[in-house]
Amino acid sequence: MSDNVRGDEQKKGIGARVVRLEDRRFLTGQGRFADDVNVPEMMWAYVVRSPHAHARIIAIDVAAARRAPGVLAVLTGNDVMRDGLGGLACHAYPQLPPGAAHLRPVQPILAADKVRHVGDRVAVVIAESLAQAQSAGELVAVQYEPLEAVTLTDAPRDGAPKVWDGARSNIAFTLERGNRAAADEQFRKAAHVTSLAVAYPRACANTIEPRSAIAYHDGVSRRLTLCTSTQSPFLVRQALADLYPRLLDHACLHFSAQDILTFLGRRLHPRFDGEVLTDCKKDRWPGARIKHRVKNNWLKMYDKFGWVLRIETVINDPHEFRVRRLRTREGRQVMMWCPMNKGVINLYRYREVALAANRRYLDALAVVDDPAPAYRQVEELTEPVVVSGRSHAGFNPASPADVSLFRAVLNGEYLLRGFRNAEIREALYGSNEDASERRRQSHGVGRMLKRLHVRGLIVKVPRSHRWWVSARGHQVLGAVVRLYHYGIPAALGHAA
């Protein structure tokens, strides 16, 4: 068998045997799955799921689960809404014609009011071990009101119970391509027409390992590692590739001489004798690079072979850096910071200086956001949201009225104490002596605030009539306001 394999491998091009690289470790029990990863003080999460296909949640009692041994937290849908975490939107959505009727609901991370399928997430228990999390999960008491459910066969029929309240039907969208009139004409002229109804069943991948993730942080290297089971790791590369040009622009425009010296552990002293230069080349093959030079040492960021984002610190003149050494001063042995010399004895210090410089550089670049998640969040802002049978309209990021609302709730004076309906009403409409008109305006503001709340953009201040803007709200609404007032005018100016 081994001789045959070697013979096949000698073939080139079409017909050559492609040897799977992963078979040996899987067949010998050396495959590595998320369940094989164990790190110190790792916590475990257990999800409490619905036994009903369709039911209204009446009450959730987690008191007993929170008192169980080893339990660190028990979270429900109300916790998700209070913290403004938002939901899970469907990103793999087809491009529909303008104005086409469609339904694109946001799936709740944890169901708060209703479950819509068997296994829908209701609560999550976090504990010190898997057994403790599972035992505590069995103590979560959920009271349901079962509702009429539908199957894939029944769902499209007229009058079928709706999965999402407020939707016109259970059909999310109808996709049509081509010219219907021309196709009908060809069928009309055909000598013979055969009709065939094709039902495509629901497709689901049955993986050996379920979707799972483990994240752990190394306090020494300050590195966050995420182990996750995914079938598309190449998407991570594409996301980084889209971000890289923005990293280059930020480094060119925002990193001053003082910043570059700080990355290398230096200060910009008035008597500094040397040059601090930044050189960016975007036209080099196979990837662009930027170099920050201080005398004969430098920091460099480049896209190696167009595949790897690489940060390097190059030390050609070690005397510019310091190292702790034992020296004799006034007859005493004291530890002092001395200029670093070339030599094997200082290799450890080379490593410390280079790693520290790389980390400072990456920390400074961390303020540059990946635009893809922002685009998705702004897109979700425009979609209607259905909660408890009511549909709440989306917002228009290009509407002056909606942007005025966003600016009003983002007012800095509300950061600590929150805001009330009356304060937003006055910011939008000004003061009004007519009591009936004030009530009408207050009702309108209340509906606007509700639309922000169901999207997790604002949260209620406990035991009060005030609201806070959530962390997600600051991110999304702030981005829309900046785009409206600065991004769009700047883009139009360049276009002109």
Image (spheres, rainbow, N blue to C red):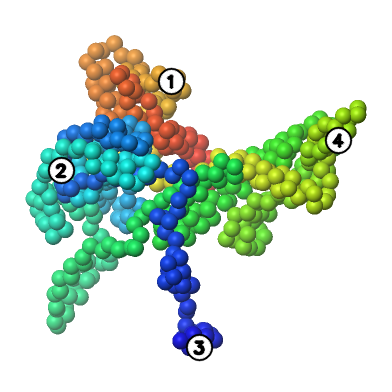
Say if mark 2 contacts mark 3, CB within 8 Å.
no
Q: Is residue 274 above or below residue 302?
A: above
Pointer 4 local density, CA inside 10 Å: few below 14, some 14–19, many at least 20: some
Q: Which mark is residue 327?
A: 4
**Disc 1 residue type?**
Leu
Q: Nearer the viewer, mark 2 or mark 3?
A: 3
Which residue is labeled 3 in the image? Answer: 3
Quick one: 469 or 462, which is closer to the camera? 462
Q: Residue 55 carries which label?
A: 2
In primary-sequence order, the first of circles 3 and 4 is 3
**Disc 4 residue type?**
Arg
Secondary structure of the residue carrying numbered label 4: strand
Alpha-carbon span between mark 2 and mark 4: 77 Å
Q: Is residue 259 above or below residue 310?
A: above
Q: Can residue 25 be seen in this view?
A: yes
**Disc 3 residue type?**
Asp
Q: In which quarter of the image is residue 456?
A: top left
Quick one: 386 or 320, which is closer to the camera? 320
Q: In which quarter of the image is residue 332?
A: top right
